[in-house]
Image (cartoon, rainbow, N blue to C red):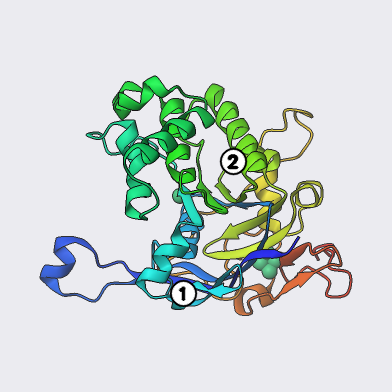
Amino acid sequence: PPVLLRTTDLVKHYDSRRGLWGRITGRPGSLVRAVNGVSLDIRRGETLGIIGESGCGKSTLGRAILRLHEPTSGSVVFDGAEITELGRDPMMKMRRRMQIIFQDPYASLNPRKTVEDILIMPLKLHGLAKGKAARDAAAAMIENVGLKTAHLDRFPHQFSGGQRQRIGVARALILNPEFVVCDEPVSALDVSIQAQIIQLLAELKRELGLTYMFISHDIAVIGYVADRTAVMYLGEVVETGRTRDILAEPRHPYTQALLSAAPRLDEPGKAARIKLTGDLPSPLNPPPGCKFHTRCPHAMDVCRKVAPAPVADAQGHMAACHLIDGASGKAEAPA
Ligand code: SF4
Ligand code: MG
C-alpha cells in the first residue's frame, strides 16, 4: 500500500522554562530535545506501533505530526502535502483528516458538556453539520462505538473509564478522518477493559478504512495491534520493522531489553532478563554518540562518540546500532 504519512528528520525541541518562576527570573531555560530527527513512513491502512518508555518522546511525536505541537524542524507529508507549511485554514481542513485519541479520556472531555455537545462540537467547528444533521451524526457515531443514543444526554462523569474512552473514540471519528494517532488509548484503563477498547479500535479501523499510529509503552498491546513498529529511545527511532520480526528478532540492544522485561505469558521464565542499568538520561542533556550507551550492556568506545547510522535489511527491518552489520543488516555478536 502507498505511504499515507511520511516524516523526515522531524524535530521538536522546546524550552523547559515554563511557568511563573522562569518568567520572573528571566533565566534562559534548557532545551528539551523531545523528538530528535524522526523519519517514519506510515502506509495507508496499516497500524504503526510506537513503543518506548515514558518520556521517550512518543506523545510529542504524535502531537508534532498533527501540529498540535508545532514541529521545530523537519517535514511531515500527509497524502502528498507538506503539512508543516500549511497556513491556518488549509491546516484546519487537513486536521479533519487527522485526529487523535488521548490517553486519559476523562481529562480530555469537557465535564460541563453533554456527550451530544461533545460529539457535535467538531462538526460545528469544521462547518460540516449543524442542527438535526449534527444530532443524527452524533447518534449514529455513539452506536458505532457501542454506546446508546440514550447516553447522548449524559455528562462524562456518569460513565465508566471504558465508556469514556468510547466517547473519546467517537469524538475523534465523527469527522470521518483517515489517520488517527492513538496515544496510549488503553493505558489508563483496567486491564479487563483494555481488550474491549482495542477490539473496538480494530473493528472501526476495518469498517472505516483507517490508518493508525498507535502509541504504547506496553509491548503486549503493540504486539497485538501493530503491523509494523518503531521503537523510540530519547527522542529517536532506534529500530523499525514488521512487528512480528521485531518480536522474533529484536536487533537493537534497547529493544532486546524492552522485550526481556516484558513477562512472557506463553513461556514463563524462558527469556533471561536483560537488566537496564542506570536511569533514563534526561532529554535536557542527552549523552553524545549512541544515546543508549549509558545503559547498554554492549557499549564500546565508539558508541560513546559516534551516533550509529540506521541499517536496514531487505525486509525493511532497521536498527541503529554499531553492532549491526552493514551488509546483512543483522546484529553481530558483541565483542
Ligand atoms: Fe549499545 Fe553501542 Fe549499539 Fe548503542 S551503538 S546500542 S551503545 S552497542
Ligand atoms: Mg505519553
Q: Is residue 280 in view?
A: no
Amino acid type indicated by mark 2: Asp
The residue under label 2 is 218
| Mark closer to the chain start, 2 or 1 | 1
Check disc 1 and report its element: helix, strand or loop.
helix
Q: Is residue 312 left or right of residue 7?
A: right
Helix, strand or loop at disc 2? Answer: loop
* Left/right of residue 51 with respect to residue 133 in the rendered view: right
Who's the residue at 76% across and 46% down the image?
Answer: 247
The relative height of residue 259 versus residue 335 in the rendered view (above or below) is above
Is residue 22 depicted above or below 120 in this figure?
below
* Label 2, label 1: how far apart the Cα atoms are: 30 Å
Residue holding disc 1: 84
Residue lying at 46% horizontally and 38% vertically, measured from the top left = 170
Foreground pick, 212 / 39: 212
Relative image position of residue 291 (x, y in whole percent): 57, 68
Provide residue 298's location: percent of width, then percent of height. 71, 62
